[in-house]
């Protein structure tokens, strides 16, 4: 089984924290949709006839597409690939796009999951990070999705935003939990070099949240999620029973997927490849019936590092038996030797062959992962 990711790299305005490849170029949308269709045709053999269990429209802002543009891409996928009957089909959206009229227009499409980029329910936060919706519009967007029949709704939140307080974060979570949603992705803010927010911090124009407060916010997140029936199945992802993101879970299980669109990544167990991060160059290449990408063949150490890096973040954790079976006894012993200090300090639990982060271990997960990498 495999997945398909479609990257829609358009935004109406750029958020100050974002370092994903996006552009504000609405006139290019029709040409990009045609190019995506062409890429799907050219790469139909990439997944070697694996059945498709997840389709994910990410961005950028996929909700900027019209019904006919969505339809064109979806029809192509169903024509070229074997899509499972119960496939999870998700699109990301900005709250201000999610009007009753929008939902009415896409009602005939096979979407059964929506991921709404809310980030905050505080208008001051939203202004600081240059979001184009208000807190009230975010709540209305969730309500509109529910009225449209969506029963699998995820929202994104960010904690540690400039000037955000612990009390403010608690309020964010209380609002989110009052909405009757099924999934929450909550990320600690990182200041990515080159972003507007990073430049403001470097110039001392904004005040960041200190590490201790960030850790306190995450501890509150864990407590709130657990107390409301949400399972932490990955460091930043929480769901009610039966509502894990199947698409993201397939990444963490290292299942094959094809990424279509500018800057999209693909993985087929043996290698990774990624498309050119340029809408115009991407369209130009596809107009000439060509692909424009870079490729990396994965070594044994690459595959081990990928498995460790991804698995340690999940609820299931690292399986030493799997490492030994897939990568050899030497790497299994290497992993256990290098993680022993964290087991002894109760940052990692070892139960049989499984290694899982404890709540305090989550706070230093990057340090632990650094120790486990094999160069």
Image (spheres, rainbow, N blue to C red):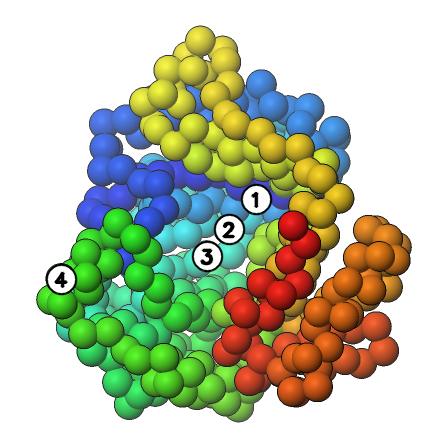
Residue denoted by label 1:
55
**Number of other residues with Cα within 10 Å of mark 4, as a class: few under 14, some 14 to 19, many 20 or more:** few
Residue denoted by label 4:
203
**Number of other residues with Cα within 10 Å of mark 1, as a class: few under 14, some 14 to 19, many 20 or more:** many
The quarter of the picture where the N terminus appears is: top right
Label 2 vs label 1: CA separation? 6 Å
Q: Secondary structure at mark 1?
A: strand
Label 4 vs label 2: CA separation? 39 Å
Q: Determine the residue positioned at 13% across, 62% down.
A: 203
- Image coordinates of residue 259 in percent, x first then y, are 54, 36
Residue denoted by label 2:
90
Q: Nearer the viewer, residue 112 or 90?
A: 90
Q: Secondary structure at mark 2?
A: strand
Label 4 vs label 3: CA separation? 37 Å
Q: Is residue 170 visible?
A: yes
Q: Nearer the viewer, residue 332 or 1?
A: 332
Give the mark nearer the N terminus: 3 vs 1. Answer: 1
Residue denoted by label 3:
114
User: Which image quarter: residue 284?
Assistant: top left
Query: Is the Cβ of the residue at disc 2 closer than 8 Å to that at disc 1?
Result: yes
Query: Is the Cβ of the residue at disc 3 closer than 8 Å to that at disc 2?
Result: yes
Give the mark nearer the N terminus: 3 vs 2. Answer: 2
Label 3 vs label 2: CA separation? 5 Å
- Image coordinates of residue 282 in percent, x first then y, are 40, 23
Q: Secondary structure at mark 4?
A: loop
Q: Determine the residue positioned at 20% across, 47% down.
A: 13
């Amino acid at each position: 089984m495999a997945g398909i990711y479609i990257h829609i790299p358009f935004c109406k305005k750029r958020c100050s924290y974002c370092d994903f490849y996006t552009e504000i170029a609405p006139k290019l949308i029709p040409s990009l949709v045609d190019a995506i269709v062409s890429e799907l045709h050219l790469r139909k053999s990439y997944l070697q006839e694996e059945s498709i269990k997840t389709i994910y429209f990410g961005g950028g802002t996929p909700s900027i597409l019209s019904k006919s543009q969505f339809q064109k891409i979806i029809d192509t996928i169903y024509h070229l690939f074997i899509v499972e009957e119960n496939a999870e089909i998700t699109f990301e959206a900005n709250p201000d796009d999610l009007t009753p009229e929008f939902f009415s227009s896409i009602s005939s499409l096979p979407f059964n999951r929506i991921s709404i980029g809310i980030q905050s329910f505080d208008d001051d936060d939203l202004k600081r990070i240059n979001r184009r919706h208000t807190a009230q519009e975010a709540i209305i967007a969730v309500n509109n999705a529910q009225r449209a029949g969506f029963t699998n709704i995820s929202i994104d939140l960010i904690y540690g935003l400039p000037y955000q307080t612990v009390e403010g974060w608690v309020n964010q979570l209380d609002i989110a939990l009052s909405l009757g949603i099924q999934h929450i992705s909550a990320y600690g803010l990182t200041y990515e070099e080159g972003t507007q927010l990073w430049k403001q911090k470097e110039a001392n124009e904004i005040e960041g949240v200190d590490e201790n407060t960030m850790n306190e916010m995450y501890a509150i997140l864990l407590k709130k999620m657990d107390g409301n029936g949400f399972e932490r199945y990955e460091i930043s992802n929480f769901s009610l029973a039966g509502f894990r993101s199947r698409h993201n879970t397939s990444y963490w299980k290292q299942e094959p997927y094809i990424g279509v669109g500018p800057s999209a990544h693909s993985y087929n167990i043996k290698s990774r490849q990624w498309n050119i991060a340029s809408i115009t160059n991407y369209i130009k290449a596809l107009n000439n019936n060509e692909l424009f990408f870079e490729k990396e063949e994965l070594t044994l150490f690459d595959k081990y590092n990928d498995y460790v890096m991804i698995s340690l973040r999940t609820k299931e954790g690292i399986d030493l038996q799997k490492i030994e079976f897939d990568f050899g006894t030497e790497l299994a012993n290497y992993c256990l030797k290098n993680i022993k200090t964290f087991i002894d300090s109760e940052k990692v639990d070892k139960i049989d062959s499984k290694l899982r982060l404890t709540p305090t271990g989550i706070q230093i997960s990057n340090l632990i992962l650094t120790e486990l990498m094999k160069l």
